[in-house]
Image (cartoon, helix red, strand yellow):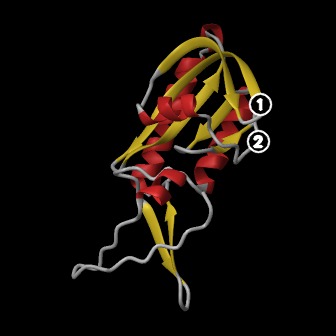
Amino acid sequence: MKNVNFIKNIDNLGRIVIPMDIRRKLQINTGDVLSISCSDKDIVLSKYSNLDNNYKIIEILKSFVEIFNLKVILTNKDCVLYSNLVSIGTKLNNSIRLLIKNGTNIKSQSNEMIFGESKVNGIYNMLPIITNEGIEGSIIVFGDINNKGYEMCMFLNKIIMLELNIS
């Protein structure tokens, strides 16, 4: 879609409708949270996630990765926020995005996961990250039953959700 300018009226409550073409292009869905900022003459709307730029959660994950030698991927609904397996910022493919949107809980599944150009093989565990605003993303921990991958996934998930609901 080329850049298209839309002209919209503001109603008496200060609302405008974001055109469907723009919502589709940016994958903005009903219930998504948007951040609103402004400069001298512009208003900027951006998709918002409580996980984005949450450095405390990233530092917690880095510590667990280092101490317990974990393989971890933290995502919001659209991309990788932290990982020691794939590039940060990698866009999620539609199948992973759907798992996150549905709040899928996966325990010790062996499968290939594709993140952008990277393929990650192995047994993985996946839990949704849920706050008062709804599903924010997912934590994925790779590891088999013997090294307690699912238990570590549950533990990290609980820490992240506590941090997000406290902040």
At x 51%, y 15%, the residue is: 107
Q: Give the SS element for disc 2.
A: loop
Between 98 and 22, the one lying in front of the other is 22
Residue 23 rendering spot, x and y as whole percentages: 46, 56
At x 64%, y 48%, the residue is: 58
Q: Decide: marks 1, 2 in contact (CB < 8 A)?
A: yes
Residue 34 vs 26, above or below: the answer is below
Do we see residue 18 in this rendering? Answer: yes
Would residue 49 appear left or right of 135 to someone viewing this image? right
Would residue 106 appear left or right of 54 to someone viewing this image? left
Would residue 64 appear left or right of 17 to someone viewing this image? right
Q: In the rendered image, which quarter contains the N terminus?
A: bottom right
Between 37 and 55, the one lying in front of the other is 37
Residues under labels 1 and 2: Cα distance? 8 Å
Residue named by callout 2: 87
Query: Given the image, on which type of amino acid does mark 2 rest?
Result: Ser
Query: Given the image, on which type of amino acid does mark 1 rest?
Result: Ser
